[in-house]
Amino acid sequence: MSVQSIDTGVVQPTIKFTKMQGLGNDFMVIDAIHQSVEFSVDKIQLWSDRHFGIGFDQLLVVEQASQAGVDFRYRIFNADGSEVQQCGNGARCFARFVYDKGLTDKTEIKVETASGVIVLYIEAQGLVRVNMGLPNFEPSSLPFLAYSRQDEYALSVLGETLLIGAVSMGNPHAVLPVDDINSAPVEKFGAAIESHSSFPERVNVGFAQRVDRNHIRLRVYERGAAETLACGTGACAAMVVLRQWQQVDDDVTVSLPGGDLLIQWNGQAGSPVWMSGPAVTVFEGEI
């Protein structure tokens, strides 16, 4: 597939990219090691436009690592052009991309992100397992303007008081328990919580329905991208918040509109969260 811009009389360099998806959370992936690419907010917004561009939830960029013992640098941009710290579905696609493109032959891949180093594992049947790091419940880690750390917070939103959990999975998440995911007020409260004054850098918002101790249904309103079909860090956040509330066990299937992820966490301080799920190449292109 070739996407061409309007002819301005100026020759523009061609950029090779790969379109990928993880449970319907879709990405434009660029190898910025073997080609020179300049990123700007306007350019990313144009590429992300589903009518006039390529269309994606996030742009993933592969760069040279800047520290020893790490294989790559992993950068993530939302569709609105803002750069963020972490994306779990994107991490799986990142691992699949660098492996399938022959940028590495390792099945255990260490990558640096804006929130620290994560480890990605290529598994059988197209699955990728990701060590998502430690959940951080300190309000300052999101940041979240709360007087002290609590398991549950009361948040005033659109004239209503909502009870939420809050955690950083390398990026900020608010988790709102709901009785029925199908009728969850995602459209009503998603944008309002995302831009709430208590979250000065905005926040991802998960609407979580507990099915049983090993199953959660989830919809996520993502910071800078609105509701998406899947959010890996959102799945991790929902699991660890409900695990803190003693509502689920150590191994939980999180069902999102785009499909299922397996999230594992034993609830102990110092123990990382593990996520397993698919990563699929959709097509190759040039722009």
Image: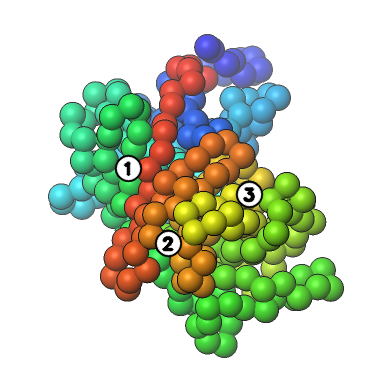
Q: Secondary structure at mark 3?
A: strand
- In this image, 65 relative to 245: left or right? left
Residue furthest to the right in view is 159
In the displayed structure, 212 sits above or below 76; it is below
Q: Nearer the viewer, residue 282 or 7?
A: 282
- Indicate the position of residue 143 as horizontal and vertical percent values: 52, 72
In the displayed structure, 207 sits above or below 139; it is above
- Indicate the position of residue 144 as horizontal and vertical percent values: 56, 74
**Label 2 CA crowd tier, 10 Å (few <14, some 14–19, many 20+):** some
Residue at 55% from the left image edge and 44% from the top image edge: 255
- Quadrant of residue 249 in the image? bottom left
In the picture of the structure, the residue carrying the numbered disc 1 is 129
Residue 165 in view in this figure: yes
**Label 1 CA crowd tier, 10 Å (few <14, some 14–19, many 20+):** many
In the displayed structure, 175 sits above or below 235; it is below
Q: Secondary structure at mark 1?
A: strand
Tags 3 and 2 in contact by the CB under 8 Å rule?
A: no
Label 3 or label 2, whichever comes before in sequence order: 3
Q: Nearer the viewer, residue 21 or 259?
A: 259
Mark 3: amino acid: Arg
Q: How many marks?
A: 3
In the picture of the structure, the residue carrying the numbered disc 3 is 219
- Indicate the position of residue 163 as horizontal and vertical percent values: 67, 73
Mark 2: amino acid: Asp
**Inter-mark Cα distance, 3 to 1:** 21 Å
In the picture of the structure, the residue carrying the numbered disc 2 is 249
Residue at 51% from the left image edge and 52% from the top image edge: 215
Give the label on residue 29, or none.
none
